[in-house]
Amino acid sequence: MARNKKLIVAFAAALILAAAGIALGIWMQRDGVATALERDAHRAEAGAPTVPADQVRQAQPLYYTFDPDIVLNIKDTDAVIDAGVSLSTHDAATRDALKNDDPALRSAILMALADLPQDTAMSDAGKAQMLARIVAAVNRQLQSDGYRGTVDGAYFTSFVVGGGDTQ
């Protein structure tokens, strides 16, 4: 008998909760509360600035590789550097800018590396200096050509010094 009483009480409580939920729903609809909340949500959504997909910072880096390689003379020698160069960015619009601005970027890179002595190209520290110059030159060129994004890094994918007296 005590068990039946517990079941009846539990059933009655569930019935009261369901009735309260229905009454609340009817009251919200009648007074327009639900409609007002939905309308406010749509207004906020419509007023929120949207960022184009190509301007969203990507979690993974995006790469652009110059093709063909960058080839330059080493100052005061007959030697040349043939370097595969890739650039990284986290912005799709910047990667597109790299594709569009390839000739100007190549020129900026050649100018940035034109005065480096041969020993720079032969040491790890010198190569790191060259990469830093490439990043700076590319970012300056992008900015001067009216692009907003920047590259985060430069990488040698190949690096060959040939001709002349390369020691």
Image (spheres, helix red, strand yellow):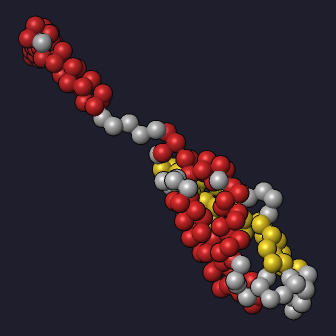
Q: Is residue 103 above or below residue 25?
A: below
Which residue is at the front of the view, 29 or 73? 73
Instruction: Evaluate whether residue 144 shows in this view.
Output: yes
Where does the image place residue 86, in percent across and percent down from the top left?
69, 62
Q: Is residue 62 above or below residue 131?
A: above
Left or right of 57? Residue 34 is left
Q: Is residue 11 above or below residue 141?
A: above
Instruction: Evaluate whether residue 60 shows in this view.
Output: no
Left or right of 74? Residue 152 is left
Query: Residue at the location (63% across, 70% down)?
Result: 134
Q: Which quadrant of the structure image shows residue 120?
A: bottom right
Q: Is residue 63 above or below residue 84?
A: above
Query: Residue at the location (71% across, 57% down)?
Result: 103
Where does the image place residue 141, in percent across and percent down from the top left?
58, 62
Image quarter of the C terminus: bottom right
Image quarter of the N terminus: top left
Which residue is at the front of the view, 93 or 103? 103
Left or right of 60? Residue 46 is left
Where does the image place residue 6, in percent across and percent down from the top left?
11, 17
Looking at the image, how many numbered discs can be counted on the residues? 0
Which residue is at the front of the view, 147 or 5? 147
Where does the image place residue 152, in percent across and percent down from the top left?
55, 63
Query: Residue at the location (25% across, 30% down)?
Result: 44
Query: Residue at the location (12% across, 12% down)?
Result: 32
